[in-house]
Amino acid sequence: GAVVSQHPSWVICKSGTSVKIECRSLDFQATTMFWYRQFPKQSLMLMATSNEGSKATYEQGVEKDKFLINHASLTLSTLTVTSAHPEDSSFYICSAQRAGGISTDTQYFGPGTRLTVL
Amino acid sequence: AQKVTQAQTEISVVEKEDVTLDCVYETRDTTYYLFWYKQPPSGELVFLIRRNSFDEQNEISGRYSWNFQKSTSSFNFTITASQVVDSAVYFCALSERNNFNKFYFGSGTKLNVKP
């Protein structure tokens, strides 16, 4: 199957610090990865689309300078929450789409990272 | 406007009961995909099904079945003989032709299956 991992699974940090979250496709290559945010008991909202070797595409309302995305290889995308504040506390989920496939290929989701900013 | 509506916020059933989770979508595209995902307490989204807009055949996979009706813009999900392990939040999602990568998720339905 297609496995996507995220690290860390949970993180607690102090306000003002930066946090990096990794998303890896373990058994396939992914030219495209996606970052979602989920508030408690709410739905997932797409934050940005991460393309290997190019700049990420951010959804409207998402601050690209606050949520830095880097997709340096075909198996790794990172999301860095810069100068985190309590309102950034959320569940961050990534998904990956197989390289070489078509745009309608299924996205495979990671297990999520729970970020708590004190 | 909400593209995907899951009107049932939470449903509780007793084990072995059948349960149907509703999903109503809205799109102007004639080509689109519909999905169902399961999110257990651990948080990981588990892919259940993908259906394209041109395939209205109902699908059955074990205890799971899906009813896709374009006439009512609905893509309902039924679990037959529910089990405690089915307890989770279930999300319906839509992606459209202008950007198949962008998923519009419904607000989710929390299913509680009691022994």
Image (cartoon, coloured by chain):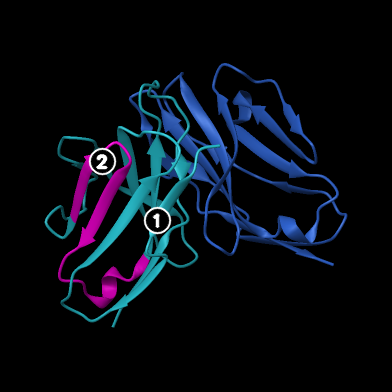
Chain colours: A cyan, B blue
Measured as percent of width and height from the top left, residue B109 is found at 61, 55
Q: Quadrant of the N terminus of chain A?
A: top right
Q: Nearer the viewer, residue B12 or B71?
A: B12
From the top left corner, tell me how far across and down residue B44 is, in percent: 52, 55
Rendering coords of residue B70 (x, y %): 60, 24
What is the three-letter code of the residue carrying label 1? Gln
Mark nearer the viewer, 1 or 2: 1
Is residue B83 found left or right of B34 in the rendered image?
right
Left or right: A102, with B37 as reference point: left
Closer to the camera, B89 or A108?
A: A108
Q: Which residue is disc 2 drawn over?
A: A50
Please tell me whether residue A99 is drawn above or below residue B3 in the rendered image: above
- The residue at the far left in this view is A65
Residue at numbered disc 1: A6
Q: Work out whether disc 1 and disc 2 sit on a shared chain.
A: yes
Quick one: label 1, few (<14), some, or many (20+) residues within 10 Å? many
Task: Tell me the SS state at disc 1.
Answer: strand
Q: Residue furthest front?
A: A27
Q: Which amino acid is tagged 2?
A: Ser
Q: Residue at x 50, y 54 (%)?
A: B107
Q: Quadrant of the C terminus of chain A?
A: bottom left
Q: Residue at x 28, y 47 (%)?
A: A77
Q: Which residues are magenta?
A: A68-90
- Chain letter for mark 2, please: A
Residue A94, compared with residue B34, is above or below; it is below
Helix, strand or loop for disc 2: strand
In this orientation, which residue lies closer to the viewer: A22 or B6? A22
Q: Residue at x 32, y 71 (%)?
A: A89
